[in-house]
Amino acid sequence: MRKLGIDEWLIRAVQALYRDTIILQAITEEFKTGCPWEFLYADDLALIEESLPELEKKFQVQGVGRNSIRCTQCKLWTHK
């Protein structure tokens, strides 16, 4: 884009759209156990368990906090 003369603010805006893509993929890979227990819709991951305690246990194992997710594969934090 820079070679095409696109303004830097627009380049940064486009980069921001894809900034969390790697993190999302790594988080998705960490949670995958096989269908039908998780579903990936666009950029959302839905996790399903038989009970709330089992779901909470899965989150704890994967390093999910109340307001953030630690990606163990890429060693990054994502805050929501």
Image (cartoon, grey):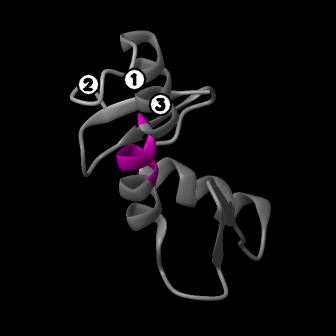
Which picture quadrant has residue 42?
Answer: bottom right
Q: Residue at x 52, y 86 (%)?
A: 34
Residue type at tag 3: Val
Mark found first going from the N terminus, 2 or 3: 2
Picture layout, residue 71 above or below residue 5: below
**Highlighted range, magenta:** 19-24
Q: Label 3: few (<14), some or many (≥20) within 10 Å?
A: few
Cα distance between the residues tagged 1 and 3: 5 Å
Instruction: State the mark number for residue 14.
Output: 3
Q: Secondary structure at mark 3?
A: helix
Residue 72, image x, y percentages: 29, 47
Mark 2 and mark 1 in contact? Answer it, CB < 8 Å: yes
Q: Nearer the viewer, residue 10 or 21?
A: 10
Tell me, yes or no, whether the highlighted magenta stretch contains residue 51. no
Q: Label 2: few (<14), some or many (≥20) within 10 Å?
A: few
Picture layout, residue 63 above or below residue 16: below
Q: Which residue is identified by label 2?
A: 2
Which picture quadrant has residue 65?
Answer: top right
Picture layout, residue 53 above or below residue 78: below
Q: Residue at x 52, y 34 (%)?
A: 17
Q: How many labels were placed on the picture?
A: 3
Which picture quadrant has residue 37?
Answer: bottom right
Q: Residue at x 47, y 30 (%)?
A: 14
Residue 4, image x, y percentages: 29, 30
Q: Which residue is identified by label 1?
A: 11
Q: Secondary structure at mark 2?
A: loop
Mark 1 and mark 3 in contact? Answer it, CB < 8 Å: yes
